[in-house]
Amino acid sequence: MAKVENIAKWFINELHPEPLKLQKLLYFAQGYSYAFYDHELFPDEFEAWVHGPVIPKIYFKYKDYSYNPIAEDYELEPLDEEVLTILNYVKNNYAKYDAKFLEELTHNEEPWQLARSGLDPIERSDKTIDKLAIANYFTNEIYAPMADEWD
């Protein structure tokens, strides 16, 4: 299992995203790990913050960058092929979008919505997003047949 800090550093080296986008990329990487390999990528929990899923320790490490790209370059610990497959999948499919678009995507997904249940849209929260909800959502999203396949 990888450390979330190493996954974050990989995305930073590859993309230099702003902190909001980094959080969403981490969330998608976790989700696709469940979908592709049936296990979590890293053990950390996401919280359902106003702007989408957040891992607090990563937020606090990079928050001073605000809406600016994270201008760091890291020496990386080696990542195995399975991890790199997930990270490259997320990079290739989500890096082209800006942070606000990715935020909107997560707001339309069941795991974040369930964790935010009963909260006002701008109400602060440290509610944890259930890992099983993330696993089920991404697994069903990947393996659900397209509507035209039902014919």
Image (spheres, rainbow, N blue to C red):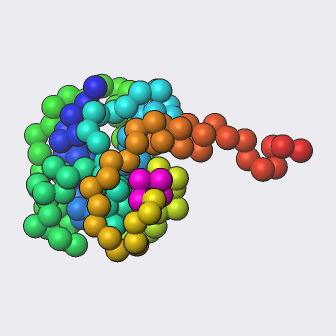
Q: Quadrant of residue 99?
A: bottom left
Quadrant of the image containing the C terminus? top right
Residue at the spot 40% in from the left edge and 42% down from the top edge: 130
The residue range painted magenta reads: 112-116
Task: Count the labels in the image.
Answer: 0
Residue at image coords 67%, 41%:
144
Residue 144 relative to residue 77: left or right: right
| Residue 32 is at least partly visible in this image | no
Residue 12 image point, x, y percent: 22, 52
Horizontal side of residue 25 vs 6, given as left or right: right
Q: Residue furthest front?
A: 118
Q: Position of residue 90 (x, y in %)?
A: 42, 47
Q: Answer with the quarter of the image where residue 7 lies.
A: top left
Image quadrant for the N terminus? top left
- Our reading of the magenta stretch's main secondary structure is helix
Q: Position of residue 145 (x, y in %)?
A: 72, 41
Q: Is residue 137 left or right of residue 117?
A: right
Could you tell me which residue is drawn at 41 percent across and 59 percent down?
Answer: 116
Q: Is residue 141 magenta?
A: no
Q: Residue at x 53, y 38 (%)?
A: 136
Considering only vertical position in the picture, is 123 above or below 70?
below
Q: Position of residue 94 (x, y in %)?
A: 44, 55
